[in-house]
Image (tube, rainbow, N blue to C red):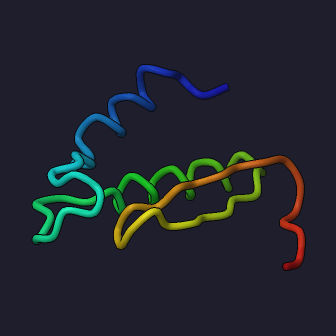
Amino acid sequence: MHDPVAILQQLIPIDSRNSLPLGQPGERESDEMAMYAWLTTFLEELGLSTRVTYAAPRRPNLVAYPGQPNPA
């Protein structure tokens, strides 16, 4: 079992703010890739499979599920 407080202590420092509305042009001050990377590693270490799609560049949507990924 993972300690929820320890998990939050690792997640909170990750800057994943959405600094621009989706579709607005311009350079983002931060993005969600670091959060995606942390969560992917954490979930895969738990034995879950993960899949990602992108709403926009640097805007990953992570899906986790039990078992091995289905071939496309």
Counting from the top left corner in percent of width and height, residue 34 is at: 34, 59
Which quadrant would the N terminus be assigned to in this image? top right
Q: Is residue 17 above or below residue 37?
A: above
Counting from the top left corner in percent of width and height, residue 29 is at: 10, 60
Q: Residue at x 77, y 51 (%)?
A: 47
Image quarter of residue 32: bottom left
On the rendered structure, is 69 left or right of 21?
Answer: right
Q: Residue at x 45, y 32 (%)?
A: 7
Counting from the top left corner in percent of width and height, residue 68 is at: 88, 63
On the rendered structure, is 59 left or right of 19?
Answer: right
Q: Is residue 14 above or below residue 71?
A: above
Q: Is residue 40 above or below residue 43?
A: below
Q: Residue at x 15, y 51 (%)?
A: 19
Residue in front for this viewpoint, 71 or 49: 71
Q: How many marks?
A: 0
Residue in front for this viewpoint, 72 or 1: 72
On the rendered structure, is 26 left or right of 11?
Answer: left
Q: Residue at x 84, y 66 (%)?
A: 69
Residue in front for this viewpoint, 38 or 58: 58
Counting from the top left corner in percent of width and height, residue 48 is at: 76, 51
Which quadrant would the C terminus be assigned to in this image? bottom right
On the rendered structure, is 8 left or right of 67?
Answer: left
